Image (tube, rainbow, N blue to C red):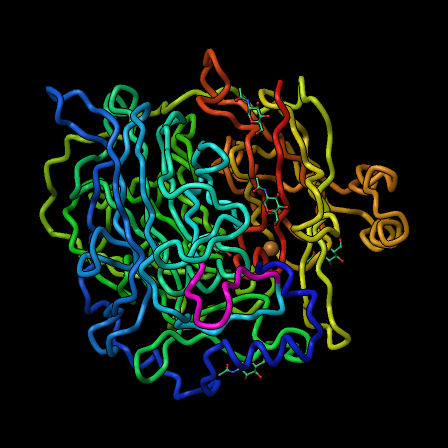
């Protein structure tokens, strides 16, 4: 049930929409967020949950957690009324937006029973005309949790069709188990968990269903000497939201093409910039080094962060792994779901306060410029006196195998398409022109690497995310004649036959050093052919490639991480074949 909805006639779909979707007026009194005073709320720290047990003589062992999804309210700003949200937490009273931060140890399994306690219908408008998990009117809110960056078995990966509603009353066709296993067998780094239900990912995240997850490996990390401990090693989870006058989250419930999709819009942008659940918060810091794990949890907004007083970032890790050496940057560009792990040294600050700002146009890169509201993120007040600082910023971090095209088992093409109505408005986006329910065409062999040539035929930058695999960019080249390639693909729908590689004759577009290593999201530039090496084996030698059966049902997925695109339906199955 669920995915077949898209095949109903438009009239029936529209009727269903009117029956099941919340029907609120579009403006419903928007809250003008420019009225909110900035930097009045302290930056919250989300609750921390240990993902391992320490009972048996201090030796860490597997821990099983039960984490619920609850409807509750959240104060996004001192002067905003409480907002209805969906939130993760150990209990309803402890549920937060973002959810609790889970701290795991490399090599020690964390098990989580994810429980849905959500009400019978959604707090946000959604759209049954895109392929959507749907348990029937009033049947509950479908959810399923994906741990982004995890190396986990298919049945624990949060497949979009493995969704379930409250009490597991309704389940998607690929649901198989209540408790997920995360072996944490991968490299130490920054992950995050978030909802992944078919066609509802964008609205479930907008409602609050996401949180941070860290895999630590003290033996490898402590010798680096980076700032550590709760005070100096912090998460900044950044996202954008708009609100109605009554405090509720505003999501437009009229689509840009209402006769085709009554609600879906190609990209959600909010006016308020929220960090750890507070709009434009403030943080008092000591005059020393801090580590910030910055996670972009927006649906579609890119951020280009910089400090008002010229302070710099020293990036030490990208979305899942340490870099080989720190990279110093003045501006930090982050796509949806990307993570930048940075050191900021406040001891060299020329002033006693610094505002973290954002100047990324939206949509990125060709959209509107930022303004006074979405151009500000948060404020740091810096103590005058220099603080003792035992941390350091080493010249070398961690050396991983260099991404290389040698030995790649095969070459594949992934073409990103956008379909538009006669008005020029997008109606859907697809990878290789295929919908999600067509059989898997990407079937790599476990233990191999492949070259993926990704061609963006749209106007947007699409962050590509591959579950299980690690990806690294080799080069990105401008397409010399995208229209000719487009015309050929329209005739033959086969990028290899169209000699797609030959169309990328332009000069290479440089990739910033901090984006050159192994990652799990890569921002694919419009009008380019981007060559990625995608690796389906762990980075450290291991007797088995993965500590579970990667070829098992229901397999994995790869998708665009602009959530509004992923939902409609820039996502394809990924099946692994045995070695
Ligand atoms: C997953 O769901 C699809 C329908 O969407 C079904 O065809 C397939 O058999 C399912 N696979 C498993 C392993 O449940
Ligand atoms: C909602 O979207 C529709 C369609 O794009 C637009 O006409 C309308 O102005 C939007 N409403 C608000 C309050 O932004
Ligand atoms: C933040 O993440 C969203 C969705 O994952 C993405 O669309 C957006 O471009 C990202 N912004 C940045 C600055 O990375
Ligand atoms: C892995 O899963 C596949 C598909 O379900 C199955 O055919 C295979 O026997 C399994 N392999 C192992 C070693 O269990
Ligand atoms: C902004 C941009 O460069 N968009 C391009 C994306 O790719 C298509 C096809 O290659 C071009 O037509 C667009 O101009
Ligand atoms: Cu996209």
Residue toward you, 520 or 290: 520
Q: Residue furthest front?
A: 169
Bounds of the magenta segment: 131-142
- Left or right side of 55 for 79: right
Instruction: Report the residue at 48% width, 68% height from top.
Output: 269
In the image, residue 481 lies at what x, y percent? 83, 50
Instruction: Report the residue at 90% width, 52% height from top.
Output: 491
Residue 569, located in which quarter of the rendered image?
bottom right
Residue toward you, 151 or 335: 151
In the image, residue 412 lies at what x, y percent? 73, 34
Instruction: Report the residue at 50% width, 35% height from top.
Output: 154
Instruction: Report the residue at 12% width, 52% height from top.
Output: 383
Would you place residue 166 above or below residue 328 in this image?
below
- Left or right side of 347 for 175: right
Residue toward you, 84 or 30: 84
Would you place residue 317 above or below residue 478 in this image?
above
Q: Is residue 94 visible?
A: yes
Find out whether residue 213 is within the magenta segment. Answer: no
In the image, residue 345 lies at what x, y percent? 25, 42
Residue toward you, 67 or 40: 67
Find out whether residue 132 is within the magenta segment. Answer: yes
Q: Quadrant of ligand 4?
A: top right
Residue 271, located in which quarter of the rendered image?
bottom left
In the image, residue 124 lies at what x, y percent? 43, 72
Q: How many numbered discs, if any? A: 0
Q: Is residue 365 visible?
A: no
Would you place residue 575 above or below residue 403 in this image?
below
The C terminus, quarter of image: top right
């Amino acid at each position: 049930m669920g995915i077949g909805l898209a095949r109903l006639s438009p009239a029936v779909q529209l009727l269903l929409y009117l029956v099941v979707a919340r029907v609120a007026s579009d403006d419903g009194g928007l809250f003008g967020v420019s009225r909110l005073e900035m930097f009045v709320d302290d930056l919250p720290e989300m609750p921390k949950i240990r993902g391992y047990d320490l009972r048996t003589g201090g030796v860490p062992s597997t821990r099983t957690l039960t984490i619920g999804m609850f409807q509750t309210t959240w104060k996004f700003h001192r002067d905003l009324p409480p907002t209805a949200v969906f939130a993760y937490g150990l209990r309803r009273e402890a549920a937060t937006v973002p959810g609790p931060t889970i701290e795991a140890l490399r090599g020690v399994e964390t098990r989580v029973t994810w429980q849905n306690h959500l009400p019978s219908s959604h707090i946000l408008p959604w759209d049954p005309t895109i392929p959507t998990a749907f348990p029937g009117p009033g049947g509950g809110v479908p959810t399923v949790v994906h741990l982004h960056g995890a190396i986990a078995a298919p049945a624990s990966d949060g497949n979009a069709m493995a969704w379930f509603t409250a009490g597991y009353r309704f389940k998607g066709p690929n649901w198989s188990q209540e408790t997920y296993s995360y072996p944490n067998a991968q490299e130490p780094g920054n992950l995050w968990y978030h909802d992944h239900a078919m066609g509802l990912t964008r609205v479930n995240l907008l409602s609050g269903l996401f949180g941070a997850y860290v895999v630590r490996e003290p033996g490898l990390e402590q010798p680096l000497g980076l700032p550590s401990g709760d005070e100096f090693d912090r998460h900044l989870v950044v996202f954008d939201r708009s609100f109605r006058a009554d405090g509720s989250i505003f999501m437009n419930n009229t689509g840009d093409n209402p006769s085709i999709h009554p609600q879906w819009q190609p990209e959600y942008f909010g006016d308020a910039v929220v960090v750890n659940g507070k709009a434009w918060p403030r943080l008092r810091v000591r005059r020393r080094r801090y580590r910030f794990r910055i996670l972009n949890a927006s649906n579609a907004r890119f951020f280009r962060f910089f400090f008002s007083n010229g302070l710099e970032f020293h990036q030490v890790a990208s979305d899942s792994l340490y870099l080989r050496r720190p990279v110093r940057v003045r501006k930090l560009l982050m796509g949806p779901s990307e993570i930048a792990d940075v050191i900021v040294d406040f001891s060299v600050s020329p002033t006693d306060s610094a505002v973290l700002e954002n100047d990324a146009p939206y949509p990125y890169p060709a959209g509107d410029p930022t303004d006074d509201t979405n151009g500000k993120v948060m404020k740091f007040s810096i103590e005058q006196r220099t603080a003792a600082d035992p941390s350091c910023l080493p010249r070398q971090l961690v050396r991983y195998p260099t991404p290389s095209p040698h030995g790649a088992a095969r070459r594949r093409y992934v073409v990103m398409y956008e379909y538009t109505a006669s008005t020029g408005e997008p109606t859907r986006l697809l990878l290789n022109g295929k919908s999600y329910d067509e059989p898997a065409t990407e079937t790599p062999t476990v233990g191999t690497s492949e070259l993926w040539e990704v061609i963006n035929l749209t106007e947007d930058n699409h962050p590509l995310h591959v579950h299980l695999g690690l990806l690294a960019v080799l080069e990105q080249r401008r397409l010399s004649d995208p229209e000719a390639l487009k015309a050929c693909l329209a005739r033959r729908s086969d990028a290899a036959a169209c000699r797609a590689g030959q169309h990328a004759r332009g000069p290479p577009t440089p990739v910033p050093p901090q984006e050159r290593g192994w990652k799990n999201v890569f921002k694919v530039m419009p009008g380019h052919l981007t060559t990625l090496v995608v690796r389906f084996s762990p980075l450290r030698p291991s007797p088995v490639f993965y500590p579970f059966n990667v070829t098992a049902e229901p397999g994995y997925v790869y998708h665009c991480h602009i959530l509004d695109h992923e939902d409609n339906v820039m996502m394809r199955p990924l099946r692994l074949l045995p070695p």
